Image: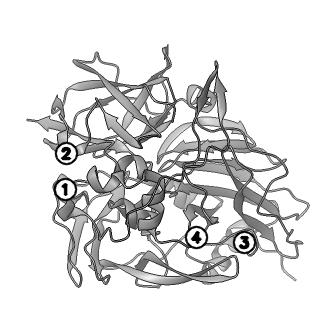
Amino acid sequence: MTQLSRRGFIAASAASAVSFCLPARARATQGSLSLSATTRVIEVNGRAATVLGLVNAQDGLGLTLEPGQRFRTDLTNTLDFDTIIHWHGLIPPNAQDGVPNTNPMLKPGETRAYDFQPRPGTFWMHSHIPEQEIGLLAAPLIVRSEEDIRADRQEVVMFLHDFSFRTPQEVLADVTGGTAVDHGHMDHSARASAKGMTGTAGMTMDGMHDMGGMAMDLNDFDFDAYLANDRTLDDPDVIAVERGGRIRLRVINGAAMTAFWIDLGAVNGRLVAVDGEAVAPLDGTRFSVAPAQRLDIEIDLTSDGAALPVLALREGARERTGIILAPKGAEVPRLEALSGEVHPPVSGDMRQELALRALSPLPDRPAGNRRMVMLMGAMAPYLWTIDGSVWENRTPIAAAAGERVELMFHNMSMMAHPMHLHGHVFQVVEVNGSRIAGALRDTVHVPAMGSVTIAFDAGEPAPWMLHCHHMAHLATGMMTELAVSS
């Protein structure tokens, strides 16, 4: 039999590729793309579960755009409640950002057109209503570059989420003790139905980490399962790959409240991009990813034809999920959903962030606007704030379009916070007092009782969301605006 070249294998695999396995040359789509916010049924640990989803015209999740292709998309809400979808990491005009402070909610049955030029990279899309994101209203959003087209490698998406058989409203009520009702996401007219959001707090304190005598809080909620491409390790996503081939693994942490370690076992990988932005390659076998962050990892598969499990390890706990990269004929291992030991915390471990270096850093210029942003909160009562205020009482952070801004996130709480700024790419320039020329990002994990400083050039004059991407923290008020003036 003729041996396929690597390019031949990738091209041949395109016909059977699932939505999480991207062929090297995907078909360009003419005209507008379509997305539906809808319900769907998945199987979790042998049980059927109805969840939310963002489904494309081919019945797959999310979108993949080719180099130069515009984000020309019609989004239809087929749900029986209002929603709003944010294009996380892209920088559309503010009127298309998908947030209820500046965009109208999408009513049941309504279709809305979006049209803007995206930037290349690994992104994702999700509802900006906490209950809906907990309910899996999220999907990958990949924008491929010319370099992706030329590269001799296979692309694979690993989309992570945390899952509960309880309703998202019950999950949020359990975590917050009901405080999300009083200090919720925007005004109440912009919320999904919160029926059943009563009860008492039920936080778990597993994975506590000692910080000089103080205990760092991890994992507010024990979910029933942790998903990789909608599946658990009892029936993982097995992706056909070429023996000895090169993979670009696009990891998207779409989890509502969970940070993970991405573990490659004995195989060495190269972290080449974070949040869609290229970094100087960082070698390793284990990489951290906080909620809403993305990692692009290049992996050279071994020539022995063995399958490679790529695992996502829940921080401070034993739960894990993952996918399996399997060359033809490889034995697919059976893996347990629990590791033999507790995984270390991602929160507070800043070694990866300190080591990252942007390939195209911000131009060197002094900051004309420096500001400290205080992150505060506690587990009881469960309430999280920015500069001492919840969303309803926010004082926006002022900036002028075009000026260099530095924000120091000063975390005075015992939980880490993945802080996301809309409409901008920022550079990490300081971690716990150490000045660096770090990665370009849109979401940075700020350690408990620590600080991270970001720098960016203020963009379009508009109110841009700035918030923690832990859904229970966001729902209880940890959100403000960057108010950019002309």
Q: Which residue, given by chain and number where applicable, does mark 1 sit on?
A: 187
Circle 1 residues within 10 Å: few <14, some 14–19, many ≥20: few
For label 3, the SS is loop
Of badges 2 and 3, nearer the viewer stands 2
Q: Which residue, given by chain and number where applicable, does mark 3 sit on?
A: 236
The answer to whether residue 346 is above or below residue 117 is above
Alpha-carbon distance for marks 2 and 3? 42 Å
Amino acid type, callout 2: Glu
Q: Considering the image in quadrants, where does the N terminus appear?
A: bottom right
Amino acid type, callout 4: Phe
Q: Earlier in the sequence, mark 2 or mark 1?
A: 1
Relative placement, left or right, of 304 versus 104 is: right
Residue 341 at x, y percent in the picture: 82, 46
Q: Which residue, given by chain and number where applicable, does mark 4 sit on?
A: 20
Q: Which residue, given by chain and number where applicable, does mark 2 sit on?
A: 392
Question: Nearest the camera: 430 or 257?
Answer: 257
Alpha-carbon distance for marks 2 and 1? 7 Å
Alpha-carbon distance for marks 1 and 3? 40 Å
Residue 435 at x, y percent in the picture: 48, 15
